[in-house]
Amino acid sequence: EVRGACANYTQEYVDRMIRVLRPTVEALEAKDLLQYAYVYGFDENPASCEPQVRKLFGAVKKNFPTLRTAAVLNWNPMPVDLPVDVWIIQYQEADAEQVKAWVAAGKQQWWYHCIEPHSLEYMNTFVERPGMQNRLLFWLAALSQSTLGAPSGWLYYAVNLWRPGPGVTPHVLGWAPAGAPFTNFDPSSYIWPQYPD
């Protein structure tokens, strides 16, 4: 039974995703660029979504073994055999033993920070925060990387997100086809401020 925020992907959906991915994967392989690509999904989904992660990303790995999969999963414990190559976790949730096991399995772990938790005890890059937090956040990552082998990357959320005030209409740039099968959020990629109406 699928619970939580996870979709119940049908086999038809999985087959469609593979068909959509195939020409892109082939084009990237032809240009020797596949090593830089990854399929991202399951953004902060609960552990109850594990069967769907296995189904969808398992199909990706079966059809395209060298195409990496990446997911933000703040799970504890994290199954090392999950078909996820890049496990992305909120920095304050990282557990040294799980990090070691993940890296030992030849996988990558990235960290991220986001809007929550917003309490001052958690570091962030908000402009309202003391500048020291920006520096300490990445020094913490460097310390962990040197001792545990991770994080080897950092996921940023909406580095150019603009929340328009009254009388301002945002201009949306970037586009993905409606119903793109790879994310569970609005496919618009970039939001840029526009002059007041």
Image (cartoon, rainbow, N blue to C red):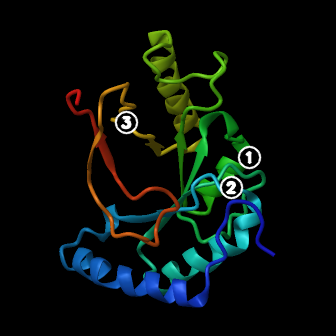
Label 3 belongs to which residue? 161
Q: Which mark is residue 105?
A: none
Q: Are marks 1 and 2 in contact (CB under 8 Å)?
A: yes
The residue type indicated by label 2 comes to Ala
Q: Closer to the N terminus: mark 3 or mark 1?
A: 1
Left/right of residue 12 with respect to residue 68 in the rendered view: right
Q: CA distance from mark 1 to mark 2?
A: 6 Å
Measured as percent of width and height from the top left, residue 72 is found at 58, 53
Would you place residue 123 above or below residue 96 in this image?
A: above
Residue plotted at (49% across, 57% down)? 185
Residue plotted at (37% across, 82% down)? 20
The residue type indicated by label 1 comes to Glu
Label 1 belongs to which residue? 97
Would you place residue 158 above or below residue 120 in this image?
A: below
Q: CA distance from mark 3 to mark 2?
A: 35 Å
Q: Residues within 10 Å of mark 2 (few under 14, many from 20)?
A: some
Measured as percent of width and height from the top left, residue 5 is found at 68, 60
- Image depth: mark 3 or mark 2 in front: 3
Residue plotted at (48% across, 63% down)? 183
Measured as percent of width and height from the top left, residue 84 is found at 57, 66
Q: Residues within 10 Å of mark 1 (few under 14, many from 20)?
A: few
Q: Secondary structure at mark 2?
A: helix
Residue plotted at (54% across, 35% down)? 114
The quarter of the displayed image where residue 104 is located: bottom right
- Image depth: mark 3 or mark 1 in front: 3
Label 2 belongs to which residue? 101
Left/right of residue 81 with respect to residue 178 in the rendered view: right
